[in-house]
Image (cartoon, helix red, strand yellow):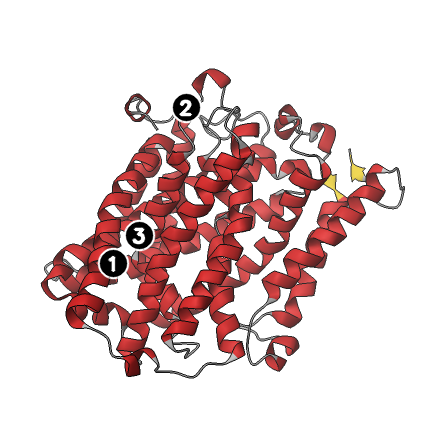
Amino acid sequence: MTDAATARGPEAHTIYQIPLDQRHGRPRDLFTVWFGSNIMMLTIITGALSTTVFDQPFWPAMLSAVLGNMIGGLFMALHAAQGPQLGVPQMVQTRGQFGSIGAMAVICLVVVMYVGFFASNLVLGGESLHTVATFLPEKACIVLLGLISLVATIYGHDLIHAYTRLMTIISGLALALCFIWILGVNGVSSATLSHGTFTISGFLGGLSTAALWQIAYAPYVSDYSRYLPPGTGSRQAFLASYWGCVLGSLFPMILGALLGVIAAGGDVVSTLTTQVGSLALFIIPVLSLGIACTNAMNLYCGALSAITVVQTIIPSWKATHVGRAGTAIVLAAISLVIALGAAANFMEEYTNFILLLLYVMVPWTAINLADFYLIRHGQYDVASFFRADGGVYGRYCWPALIAYVFGILIQIPFVSNGLYTGPVANMLGGADISWIVGLIFVTIFYVWLMRHERAGQPAIRSAE
């Protein structure tokens, strides 16, 4: 993003296609938007799950983080190439697979999911910031982070890109200092690194957690690449997004796994504060502000998705930047109410609920990517996305809806989390590989259905 771009003022566009004369930016901007937004406390906590919840020694935990991020990142980054070509937000493009009405259920789930992420991130960020800014009540820290996120969201796309560029430098420095202090100054014994018991189920649990972290970004990847010129190569957009998100997630997760074995059952955030000593006065606020950066992205995309829902119900409404700002304020207020009023046990249960929502995103990802790359080869009628009758895509596309329900059902035996553990996951010692099963079988099934549909089979047809 050029300096001129960041000086344009609040973003004027919402869910509609970005005109060619207003496209700007470079593929490397996609690297910083994903790298800078991932270096935060929540990523560290997620990485710590391998050595705390899954009780793995450090080295297997690190390997599971590497593999999980690299595999999950493939699916995340494949969505990035869609933005420059179509110029619309990710969930608007979903109408091309599910139809104008058929896409509503998925889009509504995305809104709920990102409101939940926003709220839970605020709680974690507020708690972390309060550990060093003790003069501020914890709830005041939550509100502060919420307001920072809201301002960036209201300003829009270019400020979020500028924010993540800044956090790439500052958060990257904070992360480097953590490793230098913990490994170089304090030192970690080999006995500490070997703490835990390697199990296949625990290893797969860590791998799946890292992969799902990447896949969770899929519903809004194109939101941050849609301003790029259409001449931007798909390969460039893919590589910039892939390495930005993989590296930005991987190093904090490795730090989290390291802190998990050092904490030996204790609190990871407190352990980090103790390990870095006086540097915590710099590191903890930076990592907390990183949460605000990610939350701005969550809120921005949640607002675009909510506008898409309303526009589907009221096709005559054309949202402007005022509508986007108003929608963001409403969603932020809902998230703040949840964050400020939630007890610790409620947040744990709510987080489990959000994880369940991620399972319903896996079949959407498979359908979206299969349709874009294998069925239509990137060729869509964008004008039809905004027609009340769905244009050439109709109101419902039954192959997509059938494949989507199939994808949810086929994952159930493989699911393992705090709310439910399926029979196959039990046989695997609690390892969750539902996302692998979902991605593979939904892709195959959807392509088969669509080829029959396009060949004129009368059994399954898109509703016009």
Q: Are marks 1 and 3 in contact (CB under 8 Å)?
A: no
Q: Is residue 166 above or below residue 229?
A: below
**In terms of sequence position, does the residue under pointer 1 or pointer 3 come before the other?**
1
Q: Which residue is mark 3?
A: 291
Q: Quadrant of residue 351?
A: bottom left
Q: Quadrant of the C terminus?
A: top right
Q: Secondary structure at mark 3?
A: helix
**Distance between the Cα atoms at labels 1 and 3?**
10 Å
Left or right: residue 228 compared with residue 376: left
Q: Is residue 221 above or below residue 270?
A: above
Q: Quadrant of residue 439?
A: bottom right
Left or right: residue 346 compared with residue 402: left
Q: Quadrant of the N terminus?
A: top left
x 12%, y 62%: residue: 134
Q: Which residue is mark 2?
A: 24
Mark 3 or 2, closer to the camera: 2
Q: Secondary structure at mark 2?
A: loop
Spot occupied by residue 262 in the image (x, y as percentages of width and height): 27, 76
Spot occupied by residue 96 in the image (x, y as percentages of width and height): 66, 35
**In terms of sequence position, does the residue under pointer 3 or pointer 2 come before the other?**
2
Nearer-the-camera pick, 171 or 413: 171
Q: Is residue 195 above or below residue 206?
A: below
**In terms of sequence position, does the residue under pointer 2 or pointer 1 come before the other?**
2
Q: Which residue is mark 1?
A: 126
Left or right: residue 239 compared with residue 457: left
Type of the residue with mark 1: Gly
Nearer-the-camera pick, 157 or 48: 48
**Distance between the Cα atoms at labels 3 and 2?**
26 Å
**Taking the image as drawn, is residue 187 in sight?**
yes
Spot occupied by residue 108 in the image (x, y as percentages of width and height): 55, 47
Nearer-the-camera pick, 438 or 335: 438
